[in-house]
Image (cartoon, rainbow, N blue to C red):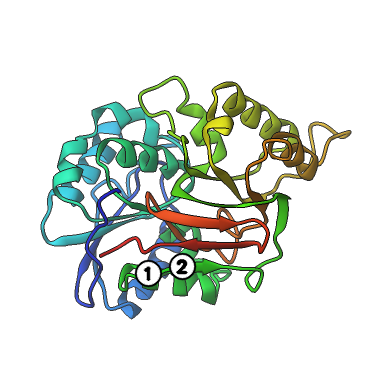
Amino acid sequence: MKIRPRRLQKGDTVGIIAPSSPPNLENLRSALPFLEELGLSYTLGKSVEKENGYLAGSDDDRLADLHEMFADPKIAGIICAGGGFGSARYADKIDYQLMNENPKIFWGYSDITFLHTGIGEYSDLVTFHGPMLASDVGKDTFSELSKKMFQQLFDPMELYYSEAISPLETISTGKVRGELVGGNLSLLVSGLGTKYEIDTKGKLLLIEDVGEEPYKVDGFLNQLRLAGKLSDAAGFIIGDFSEAEPIKRKVSLTLEDVFEHYFGALGKPAVRGFKIGHCEPHFAIPLGVEAQLDADERTLSILPGVE
């Protein structure tokens, strides 16, 4: 199993970085009191307030922040300010050994999926797919459940998802255990054919996305299918697919049609409707830990991400 980072304690300092695009700074400032409520201090990475087109500074700037936060013994965890685009641009320059030797909490989602996959593969470290400061925490829509999800960083608790949180739909029945991997679907697909290709063999694959019409989701899933990633996986956790209404293709299959096509005939447990992704509430989860998906009872149990 992968290395679980040390849990946070009140008084710890977390590092805030922008590994991808420039965050909304007003939202980021609005999010900082939440960290204080958790009993945490914080320090901002040097590139957080930089702008380089759609990037938060140069690739070297963002990479330096990532390395410095992992190397600094005073930093107990790293929380991303936001996602966007660009984390994959320096994935081949990351010092994964540094992260392996200095395991600590790394938290984010969306474009951060590319980093989750690389860190999980080459640093052997559990990371966290959860709401980010400027993208989520600093907005009025940030929910109480989303706030509570940060408690898993302080307490090695098992997480449990049932229909008490949201309606769930079984696409394919069965019960399965395996390591939880995945994240943003388009980012998972962008890693195919590279050193940062997702390993799904015997694992539970999480997918979620935002702003992708059914025909695009269809194309992404077909690419995973042709790459053997769906047949390799043990089961499927289908998170939130927001802003997915057909616009370009007025006559369209539904997302339900697409998911049924790819997951219905595989004979592997598959459940859709989890509030994981670009949504509120956002149920944050550790990646790289063992989980159990029960598609008959429509529940998901996940082992702790910290020690």
- Regarding residue 8, the answer to whether it shows in the image is yes
Specify the quadrant of the image occupied by residue 78: bottom left
164 vs 29, left or right, is right
Amino acid residing under circle 1? Gln
Q: Residue at x 31, y 76 (%)?
A: 36
- Residue 218 spot, x, y in % from top left: 70, 31
Q: Mark 1 points at which residue?
A: 152
Residue 303 % position (x, y): 40, 62
- Residue 220: image location, x then y, percent: 62, 30
In the drawing, does residue 285 fall left or right of residue 258?
Answer: left
Foreground disc of the pair 1, 2 = 2
List x then y, in percent, for residue 208: 58, 46
Distance Cα–Cα, label 1 vs label 2? 8 Å
- Residue found at the very far right of the displayed protein: 251
Instruction: Please determine whether, in this image, residue 17 is positioned above or below residue 142.
Output: above
Q: What residue type is labelled 2?
A: Leu
Secondary structure category for the residue under label 2 = strand
From the image, tell me which residue sits under label 2: 159
The residue depicted at 13 percent of the width and 46 percent of the height is 101
Instruction: Determine whether 176 is above or below 200 in the image.
Output: below
Please identify the quadrant where the C terminus is shown. bottom left
Whether residues under marks 1 and 2 lie with C-beta atoms below 8 angstroms apart, the answer is yes
Q: Is residue 187 above or below residue 142?
A: above
User: Looking at the image, is mark 1 or mark 2 earlier in the sequence?
Assistant: 1
Task: Please indicate whether residue 207 sits to the left or right of residue 29 in the image.
Answer: right
